[in-house]
Amino acid sequence: MCLAVPGKIISVDNDKPDIIMSKVSFSGIIKSVCLDLTPEARVGDYVLVHVGFALNTIDEKEAKETLKMFHEMEQLADSVTPELS
Amino acid sequence: MKYVDEYRNKDLIESLILKIKSISSKNYSIMEICGGQTHTILKYSLQELLPKEINLIHGPGCPVCVTPIELIDKAISLSQRPDVIFTSYGDMLRVPGSSDDLLNCKARGAEVRMVYSPLDAVKIARENKEKKVVFFAVGFETTAPANARAIIEAEKLNLDNFSIISSHVLVPPAIEALLSSKNTNIDAFLAAGHVCTVMGYSQYENISEKYKIPIIVTGFEPVDILTGIYMAVKQLEDGRNIVENQYSRAVRRDGNLNAINLINSVFEISDRNWRGIGIITKSGLKMKEKYKRFDAEIIFDFPDLVVTQSNECIAGEILQGFKKPTDCPSFKNICNPEYPMGAPMVSPEGACSAYYLYKKRRN
């Protein structure tokens, strides 16, 4: 129920005055997504989508930082290495 | 898929397991709140990969599982009416009520439609003015803004044939209820990432301080969950207990204010009955007075409702982390996804369903 999937905004529809709708691609599968909760989101941004609504834009800088931390961790683990059971 | 594949990386998973092994000196029980996280844990065999000191306990974060049986019975009752189109997220269709479920009703001819978004239910109401369209609005804080937005949309469109059965529950009061229980044996929590995407995590800071317990806001991929576990174990080993955010790519401390404002405009906090657990004070959302005309429980009568609950299902104990699905005598035996005795066996976030799917496959 709380599952949310990241997708990339490929277009924003401007035809409805009261609601911001968009097309979001999930690895090529295109769904209609409401951007009312994330009006700042732009074409090209990744949003986290739940029941047809973008809950938030994904912070690319934060994502990069976390991955950088993971890779440093991996290098560190290479130098420790007890065996995996 | 970007923001997914990199968090399923095998080498990172192995490194994190090693890191956790290298710092764990005592036995710790860590509860993941969300059923989505439970499924990842089972799917990737994370419990088996972790050192024996770490015991993962599965929490109550399955809104489908905690929806009271009387609401399922009301949904079933409404679906039988010839003037009603009943709409629901797919998760709810197989959840057993007292004596039936919505999918069986559909098979017997009831107009039950599965929708992907609450806005789809509003669209059905718009296109079927001669029918009454009821939407089963179930969810935690993650889903509440979407359901609130659907009510606002129905209001804007002046729809008088749209209503919802509202079953919204809140995570922080459930965590407090678990921590207040004398049976509790939890050393740290992995908080539900998407609930915090909406609400932020400032609410958890008081809980962490009051109960001296680490709370890590955690995502849903295996690398996220293992990082969350690493951060929790590190705090426990260092004797710290604060709220930390593992899921920073999606969660800000204050959450999404647009979403919070939307929830507050339609709903207000109320006591809530959790299926299998009981009433938890201030743990739910009900519709504000202003929106009562969209409340299906008010606008419809339910004269013949007889609610009965099976005593054999131990879902309540599983949802509170007191027992695991494999402790249940009915598990995989008389209770399975085809003939579920309780909601955790059918929900894609239910612990029993996760154990059935993934433990079975490996065995």
Image: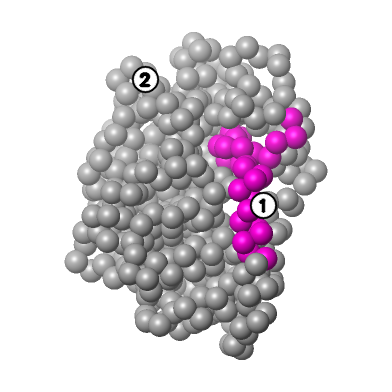
Magenta stretch encompasses residue A52: yes
Q: Position of residue A26 (x, y in %)?
A: 73, 44
Residue B201 is at least partly visible in this image: yes
Q: Residue at x 47, y 78 (%)?
A: B23
- Viewer-nearest residue: B187 or B108: B187
Q: Residue at x 51, y 60 (%)?
A: B37
Looking at the rendering, the stretch of residues picked out in magenta corresponds to: A43-71
Does residue B363 sit above or below B354 in this rendering? below
Q: Quadrant of residue A37?
A: top right
The residue at which mark 2 appears reads as B291
The residue at which mark 1 appears reads as A64
Colour convention: one colour
Q: Do the residues at pointers 1 and 2 share their chain?
A: no
- Viewer-nearest residue: A44 or B157: A44
Q: How many marks?
A: 2
Marks 1 and 2, how far apart at CA: 43 Å
Residue B336 is at least partly visible in this image: no
Does residue B362 sit above or below A70 in this rendering? below
Does residue B47 sit above or below B4 in this rendering? below
